Image: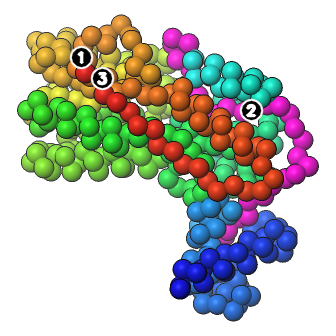
Amino acid sequence: MLEKKYLELVKLVQADIEAKKWLKKLPGIYALAKHYSVAPATISKAVKILSQRGQITIQGTKGAYISSIVKNRPRYRVIGEVGLVQHRDGNNELKKMESEAARHKMTVLTIGTSIELANTSPEFYAHLPVDGLLFTNSILQKPIAVGLREAGVPFVSVNRVFDVEGVDWVDYDSPNALKDALATLSAQGHKRIAVVGFKQDYSGLFNELRTIHSSFCQEQKVDADSLWYEVSTNTEFWYLHGDNYCRVYGIQSCKTLMNQNQPPTAAVILAHTIAEGFCEALTSITNLKLPDEFPIITMSQNGNSHQKMSCFYGIITLPSMERTVKAMDILFKKINADKILPPVQVLLPMKIRLK
């Protein structure tokens, strides 16, 4: 009965938003409670539901900003892509975006990323000459989402978003993949299993992964902190080391982990380019034979074969093409919608291919 009351109130607030009673942001909770003659706790619940649906964006003490559909917004026939990493073996993901856009008679504009720009001028993205935006590598932040929603610019994140409710996103099911990898190595008798990856500034994903790893280590009665390696974001490390940054990160992580009093006996490495550097360092500082004496499970887009894949015990396939197609499909639907659609959030399963 109480839930029905919330939903009825949501309809009232939504109708007032559509009637342009409020333009950019909702009044405060107490003002709304007075307006609708309900308790503040009741209106808070209704506002929360609107946030989860992407109708508004709650930005801390600043208030609840209203999402909008701008029906007379110019059409450019362009999709903006923000944050895609340029891979050394060519960017198949970008090519897939371009082919999907071409099916809709559109083109793709790649937009370089700037942490400073995202922090100081998040409204920049709302003024780009594009019909919609795809955000990759956890670039999307709450101020950017607020600006895009106010401007009526459709957007989709090609990463799971934790700190903005009601955002459309498509991502890999990394948590379950990590659980599977740890279970696979544990079945081989390993307890001290390291996890190596870049730090993520704007994503709760690594917090979730770290919790999974900590729980595993607790069950094995080993110290989790000494087996978890994340000391820098990929952007920071790229600025320091250039195009070879993943290999350098892998080398440094290996030396740090293996020089401990109790080093790991196996590892899950969250990018094959990092894992290649890890293998290189491991063979130079130890006599261990790979992968038999030190099994490594790593991740690779679509199971691509690389020069040093033979040293890995297993590869977690990242279905990047499937992720791209799904994200583009969601974005095209949002671009052509005449109302705000319910958010679509998809986790794609990943499989481990053992050697």
Q: Which of marks 2 and 3 is nearer the N terminus?
A: 2
As displayed, is residue 144 above or below residue 53?
Answer: above
Q: Residue 79 carries which label?
A: 2
In the rendering, at what x and y percent does residue 114 appear? 63, 35
Amino acid bearing label 2: Ile
Question: Which portion, as a residue range, is magenta?
Answer: 61-90
Measure how far apart labels 3 and 1 are at the Cα level: 7 Å
Give x and y (percent) for residue 44: 59, 78
At label 3, counting other C-alpha atoms closer than 10 Å, the crowd grade (few under 14, some 14-19, many 20 or more) is few
Any part of residue 299 in sight: yes
Does the stretch in magenta take in 46?
Answer: no
Classify residue 94 by image quadrant. Answer: top right
Q: Quadrant of residue 105?
A: top right
Mark 1: which amino acid?
Lys
Q: How crowded is mark 2: few (under 14 residues within 10 Å), some or many (20 or more)?
A: many
Residue at image location 13% in from the left, 17% down from the top: 292
Q: Between label 2 and label 3, give the one nearer the viewer.
A: 3
Is residue 72 shown above or below 33? above
Taking the image as drawn, is residue 61 in sight? no
Question: Can you identify the residue that label 1 sits on?
Answer: 355
CB contact under 8 Å: marks 2 and 3 = no
**Is residue 60 shown left or right of residue 286?**
right
Report which residue position mark 3 lands on: 353
Between discs 2 and 1, the one toward the N terminus: 2
- Secondary structure of the residue carrying tag 1 is loop
